[in-house]
Amino acid sequence: MNIREAAREWVKGFSAIPVSVIAKLDDYTEITPYRTGDYVCVFGNGQSENGNGEGRIVGYVYDEDGERDPEMFIVEVEGERFELSDGVFERIYNNSLPMWETMWAFVEKPDIDWIDRGGLEAMIDCGFRIYEQEDFDYIFGIDGAGIDVTGYDFYAEHWIPLYKARGLRYRDDDEEPQMT
């Protein structure tokens, strides 16, 4: 079994939920943390009339001890940079839910516990948007689609990196992937 096959078997065990079903729920909340490169709409930052509008997160704000402030970001709007709280901007997406027509939820307790132990950041690094919902706990989706003429491969871009980040191991024989 190679890593692609192992990741494919792991993903088969997730609950697959159509985005159309999630869209009908009124109690889901996106919890995807902001990252550098995210496009945002800035409103009412109080620093400059020119600071309102569309911009991009270009960095993080650190305290005097070098610790990152999780609620403060450097946002560039029309060539000017501002240190802004995440309460005065919101991420710009094409849709409120991921573009891929399916979202997923972990089924196995070790996977769910992994998110609670810090796996959320790793999932974000692997390109997933994460939501909380009462019935499903965490649900996640991908803003990308299949393999196209540009060579985009969502297994290579998302599932295999997530498999590795999750700390799963695979073997070249017929054994099942090992959960850690």
Image: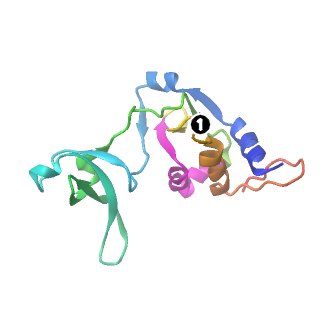
**Display colour scheme:** rainbow
Residue 12 occupies quadrant: top right
Label 1, secondary structure: give it.
loop
Q: Does residue 168 appear to the left or right of 19 in the view shown? A: right
Considering every residue shown, the one lying at the far left of the view is 49
- Which residue corresponds to the image point at 77% horizontal and 46% vertical from the top-left? 6
- Which residue corresponds to the image point at 31% horizontal and 51% vertical from the top-left? 56
- Magenta span contains residue 125: yes
Observer able to see residue 13 = no
Question: How far across and down, in percent of the image, does residue 134 sit?
Answer: 49, 34
User: Looking at the image, which is closer to me, 173 or 118?
Assistant: 173
Considering every residue shown, the one lying at the far bottom of the view is 65
Observer able to see residue 47 = yes
- Which residue corresponds to the image point at 62% horizontal and 42% vertical from the top-left? 153
Instruction: Provide the residue span drawn in magenta.
Output: 111-133
- Which residue corresponds to the image point at 62% horizontal and 40% vertical from the top-left? 106
Give the residue pinned by disc 1: 149
Q: Looking at the image, is 116 positioned above or below residue 67?
A: above
Q: Does residue 115 appear to the left or right of 88 in the view shown? A: right
Residue 102 occupies quadrant: top right
Q: Tell me the quarter of the image containing the C terminus.
A: bottom right
Question: How far across and down, in percent of the image, does residue 1 sit?
Answer: 84, 48
Q: How many marks?
A: 1
Question: How far across and down, in percent of the image, does residue 9 sit?
Answer: 76, 40
Question: How far across and down, in percent of the image, does residue 91 sit?
Answer: 34, 44
User: Looking at the image, which is closer to me, 106 or 165?
Assistant: 165
Magenta stretch, main secondary structure, is helix
- Magenta span contains residue 127: yes
Identified by mark 1, the residue type is Val
Q: Residues within 10 Å of mark 1 (few under 14, many from 20)?
A: few
Residue 25 occupies quadrant: top left
